Image (cartoon, rainbow, N blue to C red):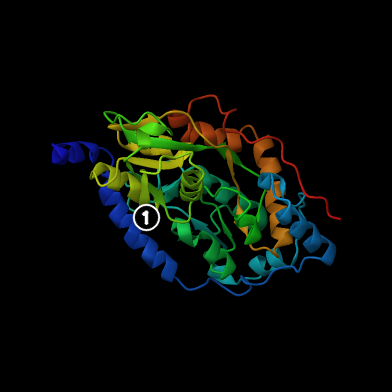
């Protein structure tokens, strides 16, 4: 019975499990690619006043999505180092996902190259176009969920655009742009499952989350606080979100907890699963960069302002193309509020 269900869920555009294996292999290769050019580890040193402001914000963190720098189109040392890369190495190096359907994924039906597509990928191209004058001047690096922050800190990438939630713990390690998407944690389970949502029906159930994700940290905290049944098994963690869907299909777990936006895309891949209950958190995705890359953070924030105002080829157009089929035509619930920025002094 389980085998039949698995085979049925793997029909369609190449099979989720097959895609996961291929993506895992490509991810390993991508992470081994040498750095493309000098200067990626350089960053504009923050002023003492700016550093004090950021440290104070971390200490008093209540609304992490508001703790970013004001927009600017000026070039600083970080951006100049990117522009100074020579020849074919003159590219923006960006950490992305390659197996999150409609966000960042390789569509096997797009041709021999199976280029990366999705909502996050559109944003990357927009950033590259603004900084380097060419939307295709990008070197993509596939990065597992738990490697997003290390990849930034180690200088393997200039930034990460990978459905990355802005939270208080992460702003201690990396700098974020203003939010570019609003979502919340939700439960994904088989349609036939007795699980009804994030409630007592998760008792004695096995839940899968991505390692290093806000989903896991939320479950861990809620279980300690008694908000999640003590008998819920949250020990299953995987490198990438798609791996959780495969575990669910194989019957190794009973439910998946992840961002509702990602869960909706996974449900679109497998018609035997569905979202259960409402979102139980409110979270915001941001572009993550090095802590001292002030000029790059400000530039990305300016790009986001322009991107949201561009009704023809900006945020709304990308939402309509990639996400309206899974999240609905009304984008307002997914659009973040007007950004708020840190004061410079």
- Above or below residue 290? Residue 98 is above
- Above or below residue 94? Residue 110 is above
Closer to the camera in the image, 309 or 224: 224
- What residue sits 34% from the left and 31% below the top? 195
Q: Quadrant of residue 91?
A: bottom right
Image coordinates of residue 173 in percent, x first then y, are: 62, 62
- What residue sits 54% from the left and 50% below the top? 164
In the picture provided, is 345 more to the left or to the right than 257? right
- Number of callouts in the render? 1
- What residue sits 51% from the left and 24% below the top? 329
- Above or below residue 261? Residue 250 is below
Image coordinates of residue 70 in percent, x first then y, are: 77, 49
Closer to the camera in the image, 157 or 137: 157
In the picture provided, is 249 more to the left or to the right than 339? left
Tag 1, which secondary structure?
Answer: strand
Q: Quadrant of residue 47?
A: bottom right
Task: Determine which residue is flagged by label 1.
Answer: 238
Image coordinates of residue 18 in percent, x first then y, are: 26, 50
Residue 133 seen in this snapshot = no
Q: Report the quarter where the N terminus lies.
A: top left
Image coordinates of residue 68 in percent, x first then y, are: 72, 51
Residue 216 seen in this snapshot = yes
Closer to the camera in the image, 173 or 269: 173
Q: Residues within 10 Å of mark 1 (few under 14, many from 20)?
A: some
In the picture provided, is 219 more to the left or to the right than 331? left
């Amino acid at each position: 019975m389980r085998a039949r269900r698995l085979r049925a869920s793997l029909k369609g555009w190449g099979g989720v499990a097959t895609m996961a294996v291929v993506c895992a292999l490509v991810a390993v290769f991508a992470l081994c690619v040498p750095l493309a050019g000098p200067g990626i580890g350089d960053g504009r040193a923050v002023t003492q006043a700016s550093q004090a402001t950021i440290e104070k914000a971390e200490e008093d963190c209540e609304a992490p999505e508001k703790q970013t720098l004001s927009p600017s189109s000026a070039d600083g040392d970080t951006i100049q180092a990117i522009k100074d890369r020579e020849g074919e190495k003159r590219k923006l190096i960006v950490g992305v996902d390659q197996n999150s359907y409609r966000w960042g994924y390789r569509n096997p039906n797009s041709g021999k190259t199976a280029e990366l597509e999705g909502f996050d990928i559109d944003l990357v191209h927009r950033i590259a176009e603004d900084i380097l004058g060419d939307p295709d001047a990008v070197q993509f690096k596939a990065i597992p969920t738990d490697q997003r922050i290390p990849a930034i800190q180690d200088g393997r990438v200039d930034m990460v655009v990978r459905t990355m939630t802005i939270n208080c713990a992460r702003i201690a390690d990396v700098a974020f742009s203003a939010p570019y998407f609003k979502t919340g944690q939700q439960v994904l389970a088989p349609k036939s499952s007795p699980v009804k949502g994030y409630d007592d029906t998760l008792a004695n159930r096995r839940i899968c989350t991505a390692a290093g994700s806000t989903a896991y940290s939320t479950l861990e905290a809620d279980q300690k606080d008694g908000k999640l049944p003590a008998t819920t098994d949250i020990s299953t963690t995987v490198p990438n979100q798609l791996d959780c869907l495969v575990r669910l299909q194989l019957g190794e777990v009973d439910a998946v907890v992840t961002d509702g936006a990602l869960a909706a895309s996974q449900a679109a891949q497998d018609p035997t699963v569905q979202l259960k209950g409402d979102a139980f958190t409110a979270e915001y995705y941001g572009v993550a960069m090095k802590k001292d890359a002030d000029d790059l953070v400000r530039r990305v924030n300016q790009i986001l302002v322009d991107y949201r105002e561009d009704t023809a080829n900006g945020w709304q157009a990308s939402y309509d193309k990639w996400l309206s089929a899974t999240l609905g035509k009304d984008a307002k619930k997914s659009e973040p509020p007007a950004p708020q920025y840190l004061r410079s002094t």
